[in-house]
Image (cartoon, rainbow, N blue to C red):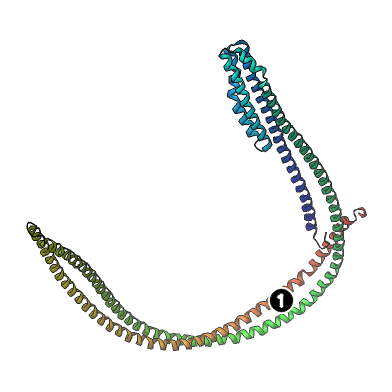
Amino acid sequence: MNRNWTFGRKVAFGFTVSSIFLIIVGIVGYWSTYALIDTSYSVTHTHKVIEQISTYLSNMKDAETGQRGYLLTGDLAYLEPYTTAVAAAPKLLNELRSLTVDSSNQQRLVDQMESLTASKFDELGRTIMLKKAGRSDDVLKLVLTNEGKIYMDNLRKVSEQLSQEERNLLEKRAAEAESTVNTAKVTILVGTLICLVFVVITAFMITRSLATQLGAAVGHVQSSSTELQAAATQQASGAKEQASAMNEISTTISELGVTSRQIAESAQRVAQIAEQTAGAARAGEGTVDKGQDAISGVRRQIDQVVNHMLDLGRKSQEIGAVLDIVSELAEQTNILAINATIEATGAGEAGKRFSVVAEEIRKLADRVANSTKGIRTQVEDVRSAVNTTVMATESGAKAVDAGARQFTEVAVAFKQIASLVGTTTEAAREIELSTKQQATAAEQVRIAVTDVAQATQETETSSSQTLQTATQLAGLALDLRRLIQPQAI
């Protein structure tokens, strides 16, 4: 550990490293426990597979027993185990296949078992059918071929291979579990020993470092006596500082008197200029009122122009609508004219239809004429609106001119105000300068008075502080001696 570290930092370092060791031991323990649990699940799975294989073989034996009982007695009641076994075999094989899905070799063995099961059930079924048909001699011949025995022997062999693989896995997993337990034991033991050794070493180093630091503190206590002598020296110099501070106060007060007179003269000038500025401001206020009235007139004229322009827009929209009607009528008139021409070529009885078409053309022509009149009327309205807008615009221009003249007068008045404000600004600057000087002088007074008060307080309390400091140093030295050399007390 670094010697420049504080006591608290050293303790924190020791606890941190110890905590890291404990965390490592805890992680290893957790991992080992997790591995043991996983191995336990695998062992349970292996036992379940072996049990499933045993159940499957027992089911096949039941089927064979039921077949033999029927062949010997001819009683159909003996076929109940056989029927139950045939129904249960697919389910047992599916469960066995799902339990061994993680091994391709075991899946292959299950497929062989399924094939042998089908062959065995076929052989059993053939013997039962022959017995039901009363062909006992044929049944005996089929049994003597040992076909059923061969199937069962093969089933037992395949089942034994499957069971042996599971037993091998069981041994492997047991070895892994034992290895995991041994690793956990070693890690926990070694980690605990390392952590314990580190804690002991850290405690020893911290104790030694603390003793060194306390020894240095004793040296500091000895140097404190020198500081007490310096405090006495400060008491003597405090009286001198008090005298010089009083001289500074006297000089500063004189400067404050001169500055006060300057402020009074500047204030008088500011008052006169303020009166002139007020008169000019009143004149400017009247002019501004007139300008506001002119602006109001301009605003009203502009509003009127806007309204007329809106009217003009609406009329234009109506003209557009009328023009749309005219366009539509023209198109329909053209179509009817074409139809009338076609009908005229028909002659004969078709002439009646021509008269109907001609009538429609006439009606459309009337609509076109009426629409034309509407267009003319709307155009006149638009022109009238435009004329009105032009007149309103001219009036607005006149009002704007009047407003401009009024604001020219306002500009002149405010030029006078600006000139007066400039003079006022100059006087204000002089006031500002005088005020700054006064503030500086006041700050000097404050500092001087503070110095005097502090020097006086130091003189009054110096003796008591010296006694109190000496007492504290004596007690501190005694405490440090007890910590470093307890046997000396």
Query: Considering depth in this image, is 444 or 136 the residue closer to the camera?
Result: 136
Identify the image quadrant of residue 39.
Answer: top right
Q: Does residue 175 appear to the left or right of 83 in the view shown?
A: right
Going by the numbered disc 1, the residue's amino acid type is Val
Query: Considering depth in this image, is 118 or 2 the residue closer to the camera?
Result: 118
Query: Considering depth in this image, is 16 or 367 the residue closer to the camera?
Result: 367
| Rendered location of residue 168, percent (x, y) | 75, 34
Query: Considering depth in this image, is 25 or 40 the residue closer to the camera?
Result: 40
Question: What residue sits 30% from the left and 83% below the top?
Answer: 400
Viewer can see residue 103: no
Q: Does residue 478 appear to the left or right of 163 in the view shown?
A: right
Compared with residue 310, is residue 431 higher up or lower down, i.e. above or below?
Answer: below
| Rendered location of residue 328, percent (x, y) | 20, 65
Question: What residue sits 67% from the left and 85% below the top?
Answer: 251
Crowdedness of circle 1 by 10 Å Cα count: few (<14), some, many (20+)? Answer: many
Question: What residue sits 56% from the left and 14% below the top?
Answer: 132
Q: Does residue 254 appear to the left or right of 27 in the view shown?
A: left
Secondary structure, mark 1, is helix
| Rendered location of residue 248, percent (x, y) | 69, 82
Question: What residue sits 82% from the left and 48% below the top?
Answer: 195
| Residue hosting label 1 | 452
Tally of numbered tags: 1
